[in-house]
Image: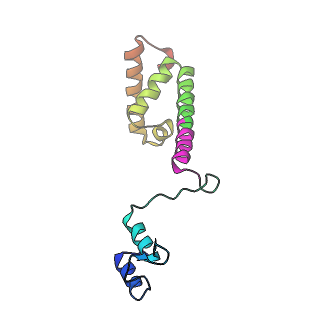
Amino acid sequence: MKIDQTHVNQARIGHPDSSSRVNKLTASAGFGDLLEQMLQQPPQRQAYPAAIQPDAEEQSNRTDEATLEQQREAVREQLLALLDMTPAERIRFMYLQSKGLTEEQLADLPPEERERIEEEIKAEIRRQIGGDDPTLS
């Protein structure tokens, strides 16, 4: 329940200190006055021990680091795979990637379309490597 100034004023009516903001016997503020002061202060973030609730920023940093490490590993694996390819295989891979295709998707295409793409790949390999490659025939 949210407490606003109306609730504070309603609680004061009929309270022994309602006629005065300070209790004359103790020279201290009454409960209503303390509540009013609390309502006027900006809300503060409650601090919880790290063992109970880990800091959200720290948890986010750990997640970000794990994600970055996974991305680095994926890039490393892709680079190693590219380095193991022959120049013709690299050209084929890059061509398919530029068209948004994988080898599996190429194999699933209708025969006419697949043959057209294979011819384009052969032409690209010839253009980049120059000369005739016996594996392209």
- The answer to whether residue 45 is visible is yes
Q: Which residue occupies the foreground of this view, 103 or 11?
A: 11
In magenta stretch: residue 65: yes
Name which quarter of the figure residue 67 lies in: top right
| Residue at x-position 40% and y-position 68% | 37
Quadrant in which the N terminus appears: bottom left
**Relative to 58, does residue 90 appear above or below in the rendering?**
above
Give the x, y percent position of residue 116.
38, 32
As rendered, which of 63 and 25 lies closer to the eye? Answer: 25
Which residue reaches farthest right?
A: 51
Q: Where is residue 2 in the image (x, y as percent from the top left)?
A: 42, 74
Which residue sits furthest top? 131
| Front residue (pair 12, 102) | 12
Q: Where is residue 73 in the image (x, y as percent from the top left)?
A: 57, 32
Farthest left residue? 6
Residue 42, above or below 106? below
Q: How is the image coloured?
A: rainbow
Q: Is residue 49 left or right of residue 11?
A: right
Question: Residue at (39%, 83%) from the top-left corner?
Answer: 18
- Of the pair 45 and 34, the residue shown nearer to us: 34
Q: Residue 81: say if magenta.
A: no
Extreme residue in the bottom direction: 14
Q: Residue at x 43, y 42 (%)?
A: 109
Task: Using the rendered view, name the quadrant where residue 115 is placed.
Answer: top left
Residue stretch rendered in magenta on the structure = 54-68
Q: Residue at 57% of width from left, 24% of height from top?
A: 80
Q: Is residue 137 visible?
A: no
Q: What secondary structure is the magenta-colored segment mainly?
A: helix
* Image-based side of 69 in relation to 105, left or right: right
User: Does 20 appear above or below 126?
Assistant: below
Disc tally is 0
* Image position, residue 88 (x, y; %): 48, 20
